């Protein structure tokens, strides 16, 4: 009798597993999220010991080096390092990580009280002070975030309806006309947060306007995105769409599309307007449909030398994080399963084949920054690590039945 019961159990188990894709079974059976987060703690602990002086913030490591290149608080990537430290503090709940996160966060404080250098204030301040406030409720952090949102708002052009990305002469941007880059979608989260927490509806309206104008002008009929759209600064008329960091003006630059996926997922979360959910799903689908089998994109989906070109782990990490949230927002159960499975699959692949381990003290290898300029090609880059840790934390929370934006611990 026992043998019959045992046999029935294994037949049932086999039937269940046969009904799933191999990737689903592999993820459920073997992927240890805590182990990957512990690995990131170990790597980042080593990196912390290497920072040479006050004010230095890690940005990247070249493929033939073990040395970080450091930047100051003005660099657009400056918020990812303190943001990563806050995420690791959220994971392990150890005081020393809070101290380190606060130290590097404080380097960015001048951004809240100086004229806007460009649109990246969300990347810089929301990732650092924003995560710090979420975890500690330090009222001083809140004050910095609100001031920074007001600074970002100074770049909003009501004639166009979007935030100016680069307030300076950049090649092919028709300066002094108005340019807006896809990356800017991520910075809208700062405006949404400040509107809710600072009682300033104008910031909410700016964020919605930016999302709407971008949705209308930044995408081709197949829902792939331009990197940049240039508008007439006085009339708001679209002058042209170009791809500054992608292969060509008609190509799908991987990280640009990842910003679109992450950005419109966030805009739907903040507005609950179903048009943004529909759009997030459309810009996601074209990305998923064109991915290589291992789920990690080449730096541009239309690069002519695929497969003999570099990947972009940073785009994969951004999309993995976005998909895990999108899986909780979509109304379609089949899409929810697909997004969850693909997001997990990306993290499995990154963890298995892209971790830096003994090569250097970053978390991930093989990101691509600005290929047309020959910059950061096949590097370890801090924003890849930031979104990798964020995605791992989101997966951990989903596995534990916690909302992806909630604090992991009651700190």
Image (cartoon, grey):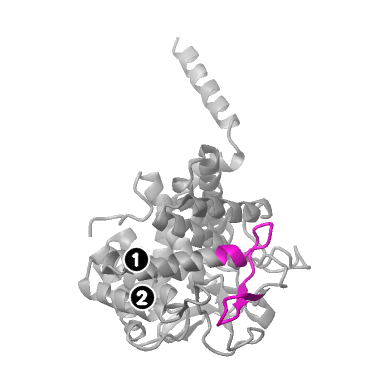
Q: Residue at x 51, y 49 (%)?
A: 344
Q: Does residue 184 show up magenta in the picture? A: no
- As drawn, which residue projects farthest toward the right? 304
24, 303: nearer the viewer: 303
- Would you place residue 17 above or below residue 370 in this image? above
The image quadrant where one finds the C terminus is bottom left
Left or right: 75, with 380 as reference point:
left
Left or right: 374, with 408 as reference point:
right
Q: Which mark is residue 193?
A: 1
Question: Of label 2 and label 1, which has the lower sequence position?
Answer: 2
- As drawn, which residue projects farthest toward the top? 1
Q: Residue at x 25, y 76 (%)?
A: 143
Q: Residues within 10 Å of mark 1 (few under 14, many from 20)?
A: many
Disc 2 to disc 1, C-alpha distance: 9 Å
Magenta region: 214-239
Q: Does residue 219 show up magenta in the picture? A: yes
What residue is pinned by disc 2? 149
Q: Position of residue 279 (x, y in %)?
A: 56, 54
Q: Is residue 79 visible?
A: no
Left or right: 107, with 343 as reference point:
left
Q: Main secondary structure of the magenta part?
A: loop
Q: Secondary structure at mark 1?
A: helix
Q: Residues within 10 Å of mark 2 (few under 14, many from 20)?
A: many
Q: Residue at x 40, y 58 (%)?
A: 270
């Amino acid at each position: 009798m026992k043998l019959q019961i045992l046999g029935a159990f294994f037949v049932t188990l086999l039937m269940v597993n046969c009904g799933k894709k191999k990737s689903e079974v592999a993820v459920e059976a073997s992927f240890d999220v805590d182990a990957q987060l512990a690995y990131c703690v170990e790597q980042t602990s080593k990196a912390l010991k290497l920072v040479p002086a006050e004010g230095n913030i890690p940005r990247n490591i070249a493929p033939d080096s073990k040395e970080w290149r450091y930047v100051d608080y003005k660099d657009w990537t400056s918020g990812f390092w303190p943001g990563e430290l806050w995420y690791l503090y959220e994971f392990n709940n150890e005081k020393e990580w809070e101290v380190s996160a606060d130290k590097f966060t404080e380097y960015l404080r001048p951004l809240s009280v100086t004229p806007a250098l460009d649109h990246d204030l969300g990347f810089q301040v929301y990732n650092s002070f924003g995560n710090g406030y979420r975890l500690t409720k330090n009222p001083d952090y809140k004050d910095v975030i609100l001031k920074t949102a007001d600074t970002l708002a100074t770049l909003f052009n009501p004639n166009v309806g979007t935030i100016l990305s680069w307030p300076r002469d950049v090649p092919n941007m028709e300066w002094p006309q108005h340019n807006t880059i896809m990356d800017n979608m991520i910075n809208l989260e700062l405006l949404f947060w400040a509107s809710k927490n600072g009682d300033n509806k104008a910031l909410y309206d700016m964020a919605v306007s930016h999302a709407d104008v971008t949705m209308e002008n930044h995408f081709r009929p197949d829902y792939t995105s331009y990197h940049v759209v240039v508008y007439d600064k006085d009339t708001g008329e679209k002058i042209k769409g170009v791809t500054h960091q992608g292969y060509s003006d008609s190509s799908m630059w991987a990280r640009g599309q990842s910003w679109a996926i992450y950005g419109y997922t966030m805009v739907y979360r903040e507005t609950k307007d179903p048009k943004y959910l529909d759009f997030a799903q459309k810009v996601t689908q074209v990305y998923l449909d064109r991915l290589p089998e291992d789920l990690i994109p080449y730096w541009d989906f239309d690069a002519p030398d695929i497969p003999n070109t570099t990947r972009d782990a940073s785009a994969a990490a951004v999309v993995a994080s976005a998909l895990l949230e999108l899986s909780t927002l979509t109304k379609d159960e089949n899409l929810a399963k697909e997004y969850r499975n693909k997001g997990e699959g990306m993290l499995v692949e990154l963890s298995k084949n892209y971790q830096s381990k003994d090569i250097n003290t970053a978390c991930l290898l093989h990101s691509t920054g600005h290929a047309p300029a020959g910059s950061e090609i096949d590097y370890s880059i801090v924003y890849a690590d930031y979104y990798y840790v964020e995605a791992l934390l989101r997966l951990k929370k989903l596995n534990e039945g916690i909302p992806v934006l909630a604090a992991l611990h009651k700190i």
